[in-house]
Amino acid sequence: MNSNIFDLDQRLLTLIDEVEQEVRSVWLDREVITRANQWKVLKAMQDHQISDFHLKGSTGYGYGDTGRDALEEVYAQVFGTESALVRGQIVSGTHALAIAMFGNLQPGDEMVSAVGDPYDTLRKLIGLPQPGPGSLRALGVKYRQVELTADGRPDLPAIENAVTPKTRLVLLQRSRGYAWRPALSLEDLAAMIETIKSVNPAAVCLVDNCYGEFVNQLEPTQVGADLVAGSLIKNIGGGLAPTGGYVAGKAEPVENSARRLTAPGIGSAVGASLEFNRPFYQGLFLAPQVVSEAMKGAVFMARFFERLNFPVTPRFDEPRGDIIQAVALGSAEALIAFCQGLQKASPVDAHVAPVPWAMPGYQDEVIMAAGTFIQGASIELSADGPLRQPYIGYVQGGLTKDHVILGAAMAAQTMLDRGMIKI
Ligand SMILES: *Cc1c(COP(=O)(O)O)cnc(C)c1O
């Protein structure tokens, strides 16, 4: 039952009810994963006897910051790793991945991407297509990449060929990013890592875990990855972390990353947590539930737009390895209407209309809808897409599923108003 305070077309209200019935069993399956992750986080906090004083922060150098240190141990337990680095001084997911790569690669080392093109923001960091100033390739790191197969699957024989005894680090990306391909499952990751280790057991397998935390019951480090990195304004910050990033994994590559974040000699021993400990702990506590809401929202969005005759990936009942839902909208006008409609469902900035713009680093104009409490937080409901064929809207996040349902409905309403869909 829906009260119609947003003036939605009656046919859309009916469709919401129908889709809700259709997706209910998928939502129920999701709750099994949610509970496992919620209990995992609680166990880690209890095992480390988190108390009120841990929630307070430090200033200056941050020496003896027990709240920060215990948080890192809690993260390590959640990821099943020896060590973790969780810092507000890590400015984004790109930065977390950058310290992991720069910290663990030396001039002359080889690096391999096992998933084809890395995420857009990592290309400049690696030095693609040109080894620009400060990039890994400019420092003398040798890079090559193994493409995914035509249907977006890992190419194990090609990975086996590309890895050599000189390969120091292999990058694997769990999320689909901005590609029309499936996210990697944990089984895919395990098979890739096994292949890499069969050629070179010492190669550091680094998983770009952005958008992946708590999507499944295990994390990549629990199926063989040496190192994971991600952003706190995505899944694992639970919508409360105001900034920050993390790296988790084996002790040595994590400390190598810390040396790169601060400086050799001080590594992870310094770094004031300021006011971040409380939202980092509370965000971690909420993250399994928040990710669950975002996933339920994505499942709803998939079926809702499929019912409106748009191709979607993944489909509502397909397995998921990240929080992203892609909807192929078919025209620039439809993508713009979709994003502008979704923005109208926001808690913040609902009254402004996003327009396409030439974002630095992108070939085509990009439109982004985001009415978020934390700037750029993509665990909050947001949508974006480059203005090129087939005009895919990438939707992610949502702190509550009912917000995502309204987002889907407002996007469809705007498209309906502009004559872009028929019901
Ligand atoms: C978001 C994201 C990044 C980069 O994170 P930022 O916080 O935007 O710098 C890297 N890889 C993937 C797969 C992402 O989703």
Image (cartoon, grey):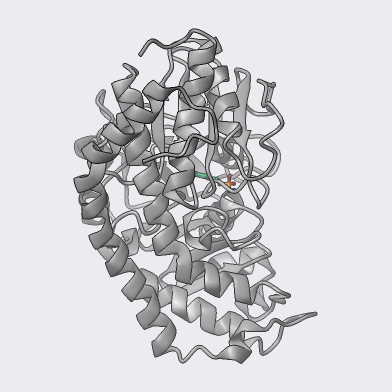
- Up the image or down, 178 lies above or below 298; here it is above
Count of numbered tags: 0
Q: Depth check: 230 or 48 in front?
A: 48
Residue drawn where x is 36% and y is 25% of the image: 305
Q: Depth check: 295 or 130 in front?
A: 295
Indicate the quadrant containing the C terminus: top left, top right, bottom left or bottom right: top left
- Up the image or down, 202 lies above or below 328; here it is below
Q: Is residue 201 left or right of residue 64?
A: left
Residue drawn where x is 44% and y is 46% of the image: 402
Q: Is residue 334 left or right of residue 92?
A: left
Q: Is residue 299 left or right of residue 125?
A: left
Find residue 276 and report its horizontal and vertical position in percent: 66, 72
Q: Is residue 145 left or right of residue 90?
A: left
Q: Seen from this angle, which residue lies furthest top? A: 419
Residue drawn where x is 45% and y is 30% of the image: 409
Residue drawn where x is 35% and y is 82% of the image: 43
Q: Depth check: 152 or 368 in front?
A: 368
| Residue 285 in view here | yes
- Up the image or down, 232 lies above or below 368; here it is below
Find residue 347 and report its horizontal and vertical position in percent: 62, 45
Q: Depth check: 303 or 151 in front?
A: 303
Indicate the quadrant containing the N terminus: top left, top right, bottom left or bottom right: top left
Find residue 132 and report its horizontal and vertical position in percent: 67, 35
Find residue 281 and report its horizontal and vertical position in percent: 54, 74
The quarter holding residue 313 reads top left
| Residue 81 in view here | no
The quarter holding residue 148 reads top left
